[in-house]
Structures are given as structure tokens and as C-alpha cells.
Image (cartoon, helix red, strand yellow):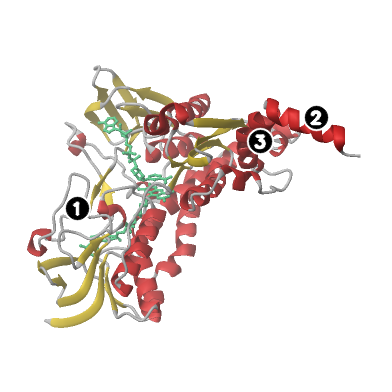
Amino acid sequence: MNRIKTDILIIGAGSGGLSVAAGAVQMGADVTLLEGHKMGGDCLNYGCVPSKALIASGKAAWAQRHSEKYGVSDAAGNADYAAAKEHVQGVIAQIEPVDSQERFEGLGVRVIREFGQFISPTEVQAGDSVITARRTVIATGSSPLVPPIPGLDKVPYETNETLWELRDRPDHLLIVGGGPIGMEMAQAHVRLGSKVTVIEGDKALGKDDPELAAVVVNQLRDEGVVIEEGTTADEIKGRAGAIEVVTRDRRSIKGSHLLMAVGRRTNTEKLNLEAAGIETTKTGVKVDGGLRTSNRRVYAIGDAAGGMQFTHVAGYHAGVIIRSMLFALPSKAKTAHIPRVTYTDPELAQVGMTEAQARKEHGIRLEVVRFNYDHNDRAIAERKTTGFIKVMVYKGRPVGASIVGHQAGELISLWALALANKMKMSQIAAMVAPYPTIGEVNKRAAGAYFSPRLFENPTVKKIVGLVQRYIP
Ligand SMILES: Cc1cc2nc3c(=O)[nH]c(=O)nc-3n(C[C@H](O)[C@H](O)[C@H](O)COP(=O)(O)OP(=O)(O)OC[C@H]3O[C@@H](n4cnc5c(N)ncnc54)[C@H](O)[C@@H]3O)c2cc1C
Ligand SMILES: NC(=O)c1ccc[n+]([C@@H]2O[C@H](COP(=O)([O-])OP(=O)(O)OC[C@H]3O[C@@H](n4cnc5c(N)ncnc54)[C@H](O)[C@@H]3O)[C@@H](O)[C@H]2O)c1
């Protein structure tokens, strides 16, 4: 048995774990990192990176088929599904070195390629090593949730972990779940030439503002995706190439392939948390505001912490706990300034409160300002005028922003900055945005807040009248 003493032990080398490791080791801590599977975790290997790469293939095919409006004749836009998947692997391969064992060992991190499990409140076993750490970080991420739908265990199905291996284009992809995974993959596949049916138990993109979700849902429907809402997949039948989903209302929906995209479950089963006195909740490891578990020497971050499940959240959590672990300073993880984006076309982006949440919180004192993409000159030039922004404002400060449209994911960063720093609408309005950019949408939303105050204000009119009378 190999005994190791270390300052910081990190379990899981995904977005969260790697960020802690890189930060802590470069600030002088002795760091040990465990990874039982692939370096880089879900985001690099099975999540953000492959999904965004496949979306890029779909976009390229779509652009070829829809170029007539720019004076360039439409082309067939026929996609080679296997080649698109090679492109996906190529993108992963290009990013991989940044997350590699070699890079982290080069930084001075002790990397052990084993799954870890607690054997006591202060010890973790990984292979033949027993590690005692001053502080331990659970960064074990999450896996696809596969619900016990009758018949599912008897048919082949894809998840976000297997989809990237598939080389034969599905003739008809059935997707159970209309959340971000389901909707992003539905559009990528329909654009790459598959028929696609989404079966969603409630509302597609149901966690988002329904007014924005409707824009995305309508676009996908226009592109040919069949979206069945309000009905769950209650039974699965068939065999490879001929899958049948029987819905709650006893309809039979047939397709060639099945993708399960109904949410996540956190990876805690291998950790033997009881041995360390670490409690869990329904969604993940139980943490306090500073991301400490019920064992004060152990933190949980990223997907494992059971809150918002995004790569940038895992990275943010890393910063929060580094402050607390390395400098013993108080540090709290907040959520109000965390953005999220669904990378459909158009994209859907949110930070802070949605309109419904803000109305509930602030009642009639809430102001909602809007601006539509069809008044943005760059959007008109690029013929990407579908979409709008709305900003929820309370006492002169934004408390939420929702954007659906071209590059919404890029535009939301400004509002993430504003919310993180409690900025005023006047500070956004003071910004000069270059013309013609999609980014002017943000400036115009801020302008929409001040327009009525300036242009429909009798006092302003009176002052201007007076000043004009007296200046030479
Ligand atoms: C299809 C898909 C698309 C996504 N797209 C986006 C996106 O566009 N933007 C975004 O922000 N987020 C996206 N996400 C979410 C994002 O991937 C996750 O939020 C992020 O990967 C979480 O990081 P993490 O460090 O918590 O966990 P992970 O990245 O999952 O890393 C956890 C690591 O821990 C390892 N591990 C588990 N148990 C143990 C153990 N006992 N011992 C040792 N190692 C262990 C695992 O093997 C894994 O490598 C997407 C997710 C999916 C599934
Ligand atoms: N762009 C991004 O940032 C991005 C992209 C993909 C995934 N993610 C992350 O991964 C998480 C998981 O994504 P997801 O889409 O799997 O989960 P999700 O929980 O967001 O959506 C799952 C959907 O499946 C539906 N559902 C559940 N059981 C069903 C059933 N039996 N039949 C029909 N519908 C059913 C739910 O109503 C829900 O709308 C996201 O919440 C997000 O944190 C992020």
C-alpha cells in the first residue's frame, strides 16, 4: 500500500477538478488528482465540446442549403455523417492536450489514474494508494440519467456518452427529453439529414422563459423536427434500427435510433460517502454556501454539487473553494450572476432572473425593456433577424436578461458582467458599441430603458425649452 500525504486531493479531472488542480498547484499547494476514466471529464469527451462541434457541422450544411437569400445559389448541403463525427473527434483531439495528464504533471500535480473512494473521514483509497489530505474536493461530475422505462433495457439506445461513436447516420432519431441536450442534438441531426422526433414530457426547454423557448421550438419545427410535448415515453419496444416509443397517451412513435436525454444523475456511487460522513440530497452532494460538505474538510463542486450543471459553473466553483482552501478566507458561491446558453440556432441565453421570476420577486416595480433583432442593422445585413432581448430592471439596475437570437451566447456576457458587479443601466447605456454589430442589441435594450424617461418626459421638454430660450 502506497501512503500519500497531500495538501489538496481532488477526485475527478473534469472541468471543476482540473481548474482547482491548476490553480492550487500554481499557488504552491501540494496537489493530488484522481481520475478513474478520461482526463477532461464530460465536457471535453462527451458534452460541450463534441456537441458544439456537431452543431457546427449542422450549421455548415444548413448554410449551404440556405444561401440563395445572399445571392449565392443554394447547394445540396449533403452532410457525410461519419465525416462530421470525425470532425468532432478532431476537435476533441485538438483541445485534449490542455486537459492531459502530461500537462498537469508538468505543472507539478500528482495524477493518479484510478477511481477514488473514501475509507474514513480523512482517507481516500485509489488503487493501491491511500491518500490523506488536508482538504479533499469531490469533482466527480454527473452521468446521463437513464430512467427505468419498461423495455428500455432490451433495445439499443444512445446517451451523450455513446452518441459520438455512432458513424452511420440515423434515418430517424427519436430523442426522449426536450431539454438542452435533446434540442441541441435534434437540430444538429435534422440539419445533417436525419428525421428527428423529440418526445418531451412537459414543455421543450421548459426551464427557460416560455416566450424565448417558443422561438427556438418554432425554428426547429420549421426545420422539420417533430416535437411532441406533454407526453412521456412510457414504454420502449423494438430492436436495432426499428425502435418504437409508446407514449403516455398510448401513441406509437417509430424511428431507427433512440437518444435518451432526460437529465443527469451525479456520480457519487463509487465514492463510499458514508465512510466520510458526507450527506447527499436528491440532486447531489449536500453542500453549504461555501461548497463545503457535511464533512468540513471536504468540498463538492461542479455537477457533483447538484446545482447548476455547466462547465463555467464548475470553473467558478473552483475559484470559490481555492480562496477558502488555500487562504482560509470566507468564500460563498452565488448563482444570480451565472449565465447559461442553449446552442441551438437561434441561441437562447439567460442570466439572472427570467421575467416571471423577476415579477414574482419585485412585483409592479419591475420594468422590462426589450429590443428586437429586426431593428439591428447587422442582423438585417446577415438576414438573422429572428429574436429579441428583454432585460428585467429593478431600481435602475438589471436583475436578469434573456436573449434569443443570433449570437445570444456572446451577447449575454455583458449582462453577466453587469449582474456580477451590480451595475446600473446608465453604465450599460454609457457604452459605445461599434456599428454595425449584433452587440448593439445590448446597447439598444439599455436605450429602451432611458427613451421614455428622456423622450416622453414633460419636465425634460420644459428644461430643454427653457435652456434653448436663454442660450445664445
Ligand atoms: C451533451 C452535453 C452538452 C453540454 N454542453 C455544455 C455547454 O455547452 N456548456 C456548458 O457550460 N456545459 C455543458 N454541459 C455540462 C458540462 O459538461 C458539465 O457541467 C461539466 O462537465 C461539469 O464538470 P465537472 O468537473 O463537475 O464534471 P465532469 O466534467 O463530468 O468531470 C468529472 C470527472 O470525475 C471522474 N470521476 C467520477 N467519479 C470518480 C471517482 N470516484 N474517482 C475518480 N474520478 C472520478 C469522471 O470520470 C470525470 O472525468 C454539457 C453536458 C452534456 C452532457
Ligand atoms: N448548452 C449547454 O450549456 C448545455 C447543453 C446540454 C446540456 N447541458 C447541461 O446538461 C444538463 C442535462 O441536460 P438534459 O437536456 O439531459 O436535461 P434537462 O433536465 O435539462 O432536460 C430533460 C428533459 O427531459 C424531460 N423528460 C424527463 N423524463 C422524460 C420522459 N420519460 N419522457 C419524456 N420527457 C422526459 C424533462 O421534462 C426535461 O424537459 C442540463 O440541465 C445542463 O445543465 C448544458
Left or right: 159 in relation to 276:
right
Does the rendering let one see residue 14? no
Q: Quadrant of the C terminus?
A: top right
- Residue corresponding to mark 3: 75
Q: Quadrant of the N terminus?
A: bottom left
**Which of disc 1 and disc 2 is earlier in sequence?**
1
Dot 2: within a 10 Å radius of its alpha carbon, few (fewer than 14), some, or many (20 or more) residues?
few
Residue 219 location (% of width, % of height): 52, 28
Q: Nearer the viewer, residue 94 or 397?
A: 397
348 shown above or below 336: above
374 shown above or below 293: above
- Residue corresponding to mark 2: 465
Residue 387 location (% of width, % of height): 57, 31
Classify the position of ligand 1 by quadrant: top left, top right, bottom left or bottom right.
bottom left
Task: Describe the element under mark 1 as helix, strand or loop.
Answer: loop
Left or right: 32 in relation to 183:
left
**Which amino acid type is shown beneath numbered disc 2?**
Gly
Q: Nearer the viewer, residue 373 or 146?
A: 373
Left or right: 100 in relation to 458:
left
Quarter of the view holding residue 151: top left
361 shown above or below 296: above
Task: Describe the element under mark 3 as helix, strand or loop.
Answer: loop
How many marks overall? Answer: 3
Left or right: 417 in relation to 336:
right
Judge depth for marks 2 and 1 and give the one in front.
2
- Residue ID at (64%, 28%): 452
- Residue corresponding to mark 1: 286
Judge depth for marks 3 and 2 and give the one in front.
2
Does the rendering let one see residue 437? yes
Residue 357 location (% of width, % of height): 39, 33
Residue 310 location (% of width, % of height): 38, 50
**Which of disc 2 and disc 3 is earlier in sequence?**
3
